[in-house]
Amino acid sequence: MNSPLSLLTTALCLSVLTFSGCAAGKPRKSPPGPDSVAVSGTRDGKTAVSADDDLGEYELVRIPDPIEPINRGTFWFNHQLYRYALRPISKTYEKVVPRPARQGIRNVFRNVEFPVRFVNYTLQGNFARAGQETGKFCVNTVLGVGGLMTPAEKFPLLANVPPTDTGLTFAKWGIGHGCYLMIPVIGPRSARDTVGLAGDWALHPLTWVGFFYGTWAWTIPVSAGNTLAVMPEKFDLYDTATENAVDPYVAMRTGYFQYRNEAAKR
Amino acid sequence: MNIRPIVAVLFALLLGPALAPAGATDQAEKRLKEAVDEAIAIASRAPSHAALAEELRPVLIRAISFEAMTRRAVGPGWRQFTDAQRKKATALFTTLIIRNYCGKFTLGERPVVKYKPGVEPAPGRVEVPTTILYKGSHYAVNYRLEASEGWRITDVQVEGVSLIANYRAQFDALFKKGGAEAVLNSLSQAVASSK
């Protein structure tokens, strides 16, 4: 989340939310359709593997999806975009740029995004993680040559700190997902996480530099570089959710909510 | 008075509950590691994805409880499936899951799996968290195993996304629209499609 495009899409989605009457937590006027289903998790205590008494093992939770036909159309558009444009670009990037270089580029971008994680952990009241993020940033910037390498991962106190963002801060504050949205190019988001994108954008150092210099043109190639760096990993997760699905749209929606709910628990 | 027997009984009472789950988790972890190692060994020498799928199939059939996976993915609607429909659904779902698993491998790439201590949330059930380093990225992958003809995998969660929960949502919508036949038709289409 680091380009004017993201702000534009956030504004677009907020207007969609407004016009569709969809707000976080607002009850639906009509019962949700059969597609508006996600899975909350599994129940404990059942161990039968051969009987039929474990059929309710995976409980279903309704996900509000009031603009499902529009979302499905956007999902189809994104799928074609990924398949015919972005995935070939991502594959070429993987072939042309050696893995250590790709890893270094990704590390630098993650290091630069430190304020997003630091501020959000602080807002969540998780000062230990905010401190860990600060330590990581200092170690990786100084010893890791500006963040190219991640020596902080070798310090047990600083290793494996899960990432966070504004959407997860909202989750920690008890704000629910609201309705489901499929955003052009970017992909799936809940209403809550779409608003969170604006927070991430405001906290990103590229945004500050853009405001400071009053020009955004130079942020486009930088953002493109970041997007290229994370695309292979994102496509792997996208494929995990949609490949071999009997309904890829439902698979993506369910996968997104599970992924974000799990991230909010960490 | 010889207090050794009393001390021994006390130790047994105190440590017994702790030791029992460790035995279950140890067995489940051992079985998981064997299956994962075997799968990685096959993947690292397979000349093509077709060969990989062919060689992996018997390994996965031994390691995974596909019948439990299919039943739970369909949910309560499973009761309305006839025996023939159940067999067909399980066979199709097995093919889909094996293809899904094989598709995760890039030929020539070897994943590094780190196992964390397993937990036993309920008797006969063990969850083993792992982190997998693959193609330069780290993924949190949790395996769920259950005791049924030995320890067998009944679900896999990648970054919190449960394989079975994901299919459960898809099958639920299909079943409500068209019953068992709708589920079977969609499964057949998914298996028939190249990707």
Image (tube, coloured by chain):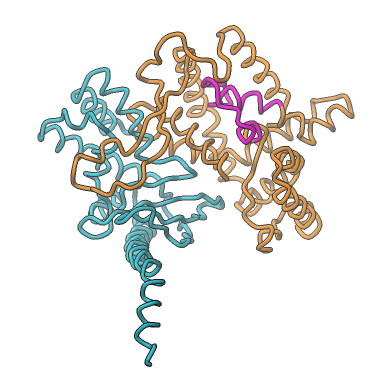
Task: Please state if A48 lies on the left or on the right of A144 as rendered.
Answer: left
Above or below residue A6? Residue B109 is: below
Q: Which residue is drawn at 59% across and 11% down?
A: A16
- Is B14 magenta? The answer is no
| Nearest to the observer: residue A157 or residue B52 | A157
Q: Which residue lies furthest to the front in this view?
A: B1
The picture places residue B81, in percent across and down from the top left corner, at 15, 30
Shade of chain B as shown in the rendered figure? cyan
- Extent of the magenta region: A169-198
| Nearest to the observer: residue B85 or residue A129 | A129
Query: Is the N terminus of chain A in the top left, top right, bottom left or bottom right quadrant?
Result: top right
Q: Which residue lies furthest to the right in this view?
A: A213
- Is A177 magenta? The answer is yes
Q: In which quarter of the image is residue A201?
A: top right
| Nearest to the observer: residue A74 or residue A153 | A153
The picture places residue B183, in percent across and down from the top left corner, at 24, 26
Q: Quadrant of residue A23?
A: top right
The picture places residue A2, in percent across and down from the top left corner, at 71, 31
Shade of chain A as shown in the rendered figure? orange
Q: Which residue is drawn at 30% across and 28% down?
A: B171
| Nearest to the observer: residue B88 or residue B74 | B74
Above or below residue B92? Residue A77 is: above
Task: Please state if A187 lies on the left or on the right of A204 as rendered.
Answer: left
Task: Please state if A87 lies on the left or on the right of B125 as rendered.
Answer: right
Q: In which quarter of the image is residue A150?
A: bottom right
Q: Residue at x 70, y 25 (%)?
A: A198
Q: Residue at x 69, y 46 (%)?
A: A105
Above or below residue A111? Residue B148 is: below
The picture places residue A220, in percent across and down from the top left corner, at 74, 29
